[in-house]
């Protein structure tokens, strides 16, 4: 049981390092002003950030996901693995249910973490530019939000996060299960690593496509009020106003950078988790076999 949590922690750290630059671009594109856009698209956004802020600008706000996502992945893979065992049978339906349960539970950590990440990623850019830095780091960001807005403030966007994460993680684990079965990902297979990378990457893409419009809404709600003025009263109000101003394309903003990020991040995460579990479980089996062998008598 503990192995699922530990494997998720290792896989989460690998995923954050690979994917955070893409996430920074995604957030910048999702919340930029339609009247005065700073970026023409994904690649222009990448170029602009590196030119104006150096490559480290792509890693703004990484403290929050590095602290949070390692724990979140530990929670997700731990809950999913234990839920599958509790359901008693490893079927596609149970994979979806277990993934959905894991996605819902991790929202308690995911929502405040993404709020801090979003605020840090927007700090010092365009219409969010201030004369001085408002937040020193992700923890300082959450502390200041809590001081100003209380518990409700650090949980801003919780409902939209829950709507996004619950089915998304269901599709995430369902897709990975189906692909690994069809590809025949066995430990003795010499091509097991490329197969795991492919299955993990595609799982991430399917997961994001399943609920991406809600991610746009979540980002806008969490960025709302940064300039001191609230634009949206809730999820439906955000959907309505966003659609009225920008049309249906608003719900695909940042999708290119998200999908570019989704494949390598989830390929790294799932492959790391699976290989870690394969290795640790083989070690456990070997230890049990050695313990079962007759011990030589001491001289």
Image (cartoon, grey):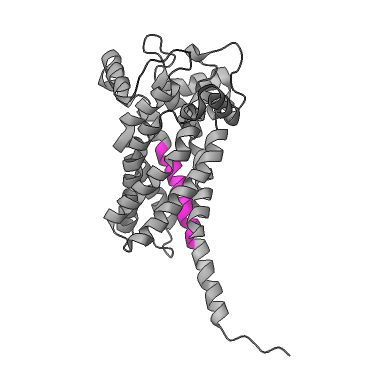
By secondary structure, the bulk of the magenta-drawn segment is best described as helix
Q: Which of 79 and 252 is in front in this view?
A: 79
Q: Where is residue 117 in the image (x, y as percent from the top left)?
A: 51, 29
Magenta-highlighted residues: 262-278
Is residue 17 visible in this depiction of the protein? no
Number of numbered discs on residues: 0
Q: Is residue 276 magenta?
A: yes
Residue at 36% x, 37% y: name it.
Answer: 162
Q: Where is residue 201 in the image (x, y as percent from the top left)?
A: 39, 44
Q: Residue 159 falls in which quadrant of the image?
A: top left
On the picture, is 122 further left or further right than 254? Answer: right
- Identify the image quadrant of the C terminus: bottom right
Is residue 192 visible in this depiction of the protein? yes
Q: Position of residue 251 (x, y in %)?
A: 31, 25
Residue at 38% x, 44% y: name it.
Answer: 103
Q: In this view, does 131 lie above or below 278?
A: above
């Amino acid at each position: 049981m503990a192995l699922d949590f530990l494997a998720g922690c290792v896989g989460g750290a690998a995923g954050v390092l690979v994917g955070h630059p893409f996430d920074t671009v995604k957030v910048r594109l999702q919340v930029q002003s339609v009247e005065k856009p700073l970026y023409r698209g994904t690649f222009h956004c990448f170029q602009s950030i590196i030119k104006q802020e150096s490559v480290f600008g792509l890693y703004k706000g990484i403290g929050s996901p590095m602290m949070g996502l390692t724990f979140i992945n530990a929670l997700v893979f731990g809950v999913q693995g234990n839920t599958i065992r509790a359901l008693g049978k490893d079927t596609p339906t149970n994979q979806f249910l277990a993934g959905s349960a894991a996605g819902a539970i991790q929202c308690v950590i995911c929502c405040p973490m993404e709020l801090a990440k979003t605020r840090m990623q927007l700090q010092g850019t365009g219409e969010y530019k201030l004369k001085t830095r408002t937040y020193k780091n992700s923890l300082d960001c959450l502390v200041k939000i809590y001081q100003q807005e209380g518990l409700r403030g650090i949980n801003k966007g919780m409902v939209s996060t829950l709507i996004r994460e619950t089915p998304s993680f269901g599709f995430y684990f369902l897709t990975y299960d189906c692909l690994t079965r069809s590809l025949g990902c066995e430990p003795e297979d010499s091509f097991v690593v490329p197969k795991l990378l492919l299955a993990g990457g595609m799982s991430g893409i399917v997961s994001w496509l399943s609920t991406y419009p809600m991610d746009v809404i979540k980002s806008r709600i969490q960025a709302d009020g940064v300039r001191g003025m609230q634009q949206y009263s809730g999820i439906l109000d955000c959907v309505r106003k966003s659609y009225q101003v920008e049309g249906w394309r608003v719900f695909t903003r940042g999708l290119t950078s998200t999908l570019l990020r989704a494949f390598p991040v989830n390929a790294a995460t799932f492959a790391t988790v699976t290989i870690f579990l394969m290795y640790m479980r083989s070690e456990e089996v070997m230890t049990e076999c050695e313990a079962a062998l007759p011990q030589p008598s001491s001289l």
